[in-house]
Amino acid sequence: MQRRLVRTVLVALAALAGLVVSTPALSATAPVRIMPLGDTTPPTVPTGLRTTVSCSPYTVTLSWTASTDNVGVAGYDVYRATNGGAFTSAGTTTTTSFTQPITGLLQFKVRARDTAGNTSAFTEPVSIVPPPCPTLPPDTQAPTTPGTPTASATCGSVTLSWTASTDNVGVTGYEIWRASGTTGGTFVSVGASTTTSFTQSGVGIFRYQVRARDAAGNTSAFTSPVTAAAPACPEPPPTCTAVYNQIGSWSGGSQGKVTVTNTGTTGTTGWTVTLTFPDGQRITQIWGARTDSTAGPYTITNESYNGSLAPSGSTTFGFLATSSGTATPPTATCTPTPSS
């Protein structure tokens, strides 16, 4: 009885202290265990939310008086509304201040948060009124002239590079101008670059000059011209294929067809196909092409009307052949004659 009375007193005292008492069921002699309840108490609302606006850089700094909590404040959530819109999270901080760039008409509110995830109510919103920051004088100073470009040419293009300009505020890019030939002509703009290099496609001899510009539109003087010659890229060699198909066969003979296709990027004026028969077959008749060979391997050339093939174009020729056994398909290779 006395132990039950003690247990009842402990339960009552623990409840007042925010604790829970645990004892095994149906045990009058088991020890009493006292455990803390989960933290459900939110922090107090931050107070004294105030703002300080800076013109350089154009920012606002929020500050407030710290919240308190029965366990401990872990940090603060800062919410922001822009131009009368909805409040959204702007960030978090573990201190009692927070700095943000000013981007329009802003409102801020803050709440505290503890380690258990409990959050306080929000502060009343504060509005940010941008101050009349002094107007900076206009930038009228031009960048320095870039270094004289160097040019490297490959087939079909020229790459320029130069040393960077400087500016009292900052260089934003470079203009590249070009004139045809080694002398004379008029320079015209052919591009811009935010780096100190530029590649231009084209074939010929050209003169290039470069100038820098800044955000205010000021431009430097032009560099001295540099001359570069970009040669034409050589045409890739022509290619073609020859594909054999057997049309029919019989005892002692067969009929075949060969399709010749221009697989290159330039046209052909003619082609030569070599047929090699593994079983000694002999061509007895041919059409759509001609050959002077009397035995394999056969060298076969185009007729006057089907030698010119555009890229991806094709033509065919056929033949009859005799054989003493199985008419095994020949191997076929093609060599094009390029256009002049």
Image (cartoon, rainbow, N blue to C red):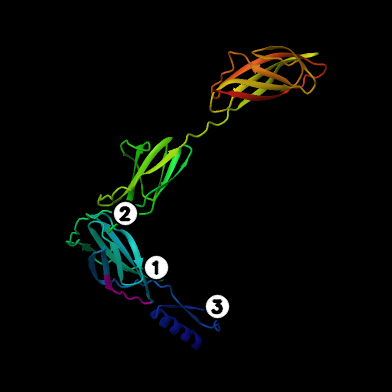
Q: Is disc 2 placed on a helix, strand or loop?
A: strand
Q: Residues within 10 Å of mark 2 (few under 14, many from 20)?
A: many
**68 in magenta:** yes
134 up-or-down from 159: above or below: below
Residue 133 on image: x %, y % = 18, 62
Q: Is disc 1 placed on a helix, strand or loop?
A: loop
Residue on which the image places disc 3: 26
In the rendered view, does 199 fall on the left or right side of 189? right
Instruction: Please state which amino acid type lies under the numbered disc 1.
Output: Gly
Residue on which the image places disc 1: 117
Q: Are marks 1 and 3 in contact (CB under 8 Å)?
A: no
312 up-or-down from 208: above or below: above
Q: Is disc 3 placed on a helix, strand or loop?
A: loop
Q: Residue furthest right?
A: 324
Q: Residues within 10 Å of mark 3 (few under 14, many from 20)?
A: few
SS assignment for the magenta stretch, majority: loop
Mark 2 to mark 1 CA distance (whole Å): 49 Å
**Comes first in the chain, label 2 or label 1:** 1
Mark 1 to mark 3 CA distance (whole Å): 37 Å
Q: Using the rendered view, name the quadrant where residue 76 is placed.
A: bottom left
Q: Residues within 10 Å of mark 1 (few under 14, many from 20)?
A: some
Q: Of the residues tagged 1 and 3, which is closer to the observer?
A: 1
**Comes first in the chain, label 1 or label 3:** 3
Mark 3 to mark 2 CA distance (whole Å): 84 Å
Residue on which the image places disc 2: 171
Which stretch appears magenta? 63-70
Please say whether residue 1 is visible from this viewpoint. no
Q: Are marks 3 and 2 in contact (CB under 8 Å)?
A: no
In the rendered view, does 248 fall on the left or right side of 267? right
225 up-or-down from 85: above or below: above
